[in-house]
Amino acid sequence: MTAFDTVIRHGTIATASETYKADVGIWNGRIVAIGEALTDANETVDATGLLVLPGGIDSHVHIAQPSGPGIVMADDFESATRAAAFGGNTFVMPYCLQAKGQPIREALKNYHTLADQNCHIDHSFHLIIADPSEAVLGQELPALIADGYTSLKVFMTYEDLALSDLQILQVLAVARESGALVQVHAENYDAIRFLVDKLEHDGNVGPYFHAKSRPIVVEREATHRAISLAELVDVSMVVVHVSNRESMEEIRRAQQRGLTIHGETCPQYLVLTEEDLKDLGMEGAKYVCSPPPRDLASQQACWEGLQQGVFSLFSSDHCPFRYDDVQGKQPPNARTSFRWIPNGIPGVETRLPILFSEGVSKGRITLNQFVALTSTNHAKTYGLTRKGSIAIGNDADIALWDPKRQATLTQANLHHGADYTPYEGLEITGWPVATMLRGKFVTRDGKLVGGKVEGRYVSRAAPFPGKGATSTAA
Ligand code: DUC
Ligand code: ZN
Ligand code: ZN
């Protein structure tokens, strides 16, 4: 019998804190040795010139999520996780959306049915709380959190999703008691409704006006309010998909006050601007997402948030719709107003290459920051105990990166279900050449390996066992 199933030799390992040359020994799906000149393996992988990184963990993706009458997301679990694997990821956290009046367990059963046996990489679910009824708050949620569904999302906008401040406080209180973590989509619903009506009244209905209907102040106000509600309840929170300086500064101030408020930003806020929606006519719909991309100054602010640690999470917010499809960005009413364009863009496959290229290759962040922002912090924040780092005992979830490989992002080379990428033509330096899940290759040299889907559902620990977390000083 050999000591290892697989040894990865001659690579450069990077974790959230260290970069060093060493071999990695894998046995039974786990990393069991890190050292020099490891031999005695069934398979030896030569990683000369490659980085050996923990597989990306994308803690913000939407897969097969109901998105309104007649609208269908472009990815199912198979295609989304295939695309994710090609993009260097080994774990995704999609959402389970509770419909109004629906028991969350019923919604979860549907998502598990869709995901089981269909995922190329591992996954777990965040719960979107659309209807915090007495039964949900009193019984369902505490039981689900105890069962390993330890993160929730609340919305401050969208018909059928927006919760009142009272409802958000109630959800936060349950999270505090049960040790769960709440994500918030921070945009002011009434302000958006007011602006949408006004823009439509004035005949400003093209996709570009989507961005004008949700300006920065709408996001900043909601961010401030969400943080205040978390402070009131004395509980942690993640502010997701932050797009601009003012919202980032709200989070920074909260962190400086000692609150545990996590910030997340996404590729679209680093490389797109609202100008991308302009002068394209209907094609601007390809960039419609919420919050919308802003301007160059906002991009710079998001970089500062990443560099300075205000944002600890970099996720894709993959929310794919086909462009040339009445079930996607062209629903029958779309031509009458941006109001009807489904919000969201594809990005699970391009998240890591974009941050690596724009961040590490261009010297804006270090390789170790990259690892933290794309993998380690996601595992720590959301209670994944055996993932997110190259470390002995962890699952052998690994991405092999060629830091010098040049590529151009283009739809023809991607694997998602959407029929476009908003990043068409972006030049990339640094590319994931192979992805390994629990010691087995999922992708290698641009090909899916094996064809077997080995991704599993993973139950997560409560990020704050016992009572809700309080200050960072604790
Ligand atoms: N919020 C998300 O988190 N994703 C896509 C659309 C949205 O509004
Ligand atoms: Zn959101
Ligand atoms: Zn999202």
Image: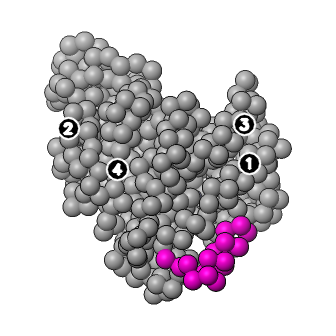
Residue carrying label 3: 254
Disc on res. 405: 2
Q: Amino acid at mark 2?
A: Arg
- Mark 3 or 4, nearer chain start: 3
- Mark 1 or 2, nearer chain start: 1
Image side of residue 84 versus residue 296, left or right: left
Q: Give the alpha-carbon distance from disc 3 to disc 4, as whole Å.
A: 31 Å
Please identify the quarter of the rendering in which residue 192 is found: bottom right
Q: Position of residue 209 (x, y in %)?
A: 54, 71
Residue carrying label 1: 224
Residue carrying label 4: 350
Image side of residue 467 versus residue 387, left or right: right
Residue 373 is at least partly visible in this image? yes
Residue 160 position (above or below residue 450): below
Residue 121 is at least partly visible in this image? no
- Mark 3 or 2, nearer chain start: 3
**What crowding class fits label 2: few (fewer than 14 Cα within 10 Å), some (14-19), or many (20 or more)?**
few
**What crowding class fits label 1: few (fewer than 14 Cα within 10 Å), some (14-19), or many (20 or more)?**
some
Q: Give the alpha-carbon distance from disc 2 to disc 4, as whole Å.
A: 15 Å
- Residue range highlighted in magenta: 190-206
Magenta stretch, main secondary structure, is helix
Question: Residue visible at 50% across and 52% down?
Answer: 295
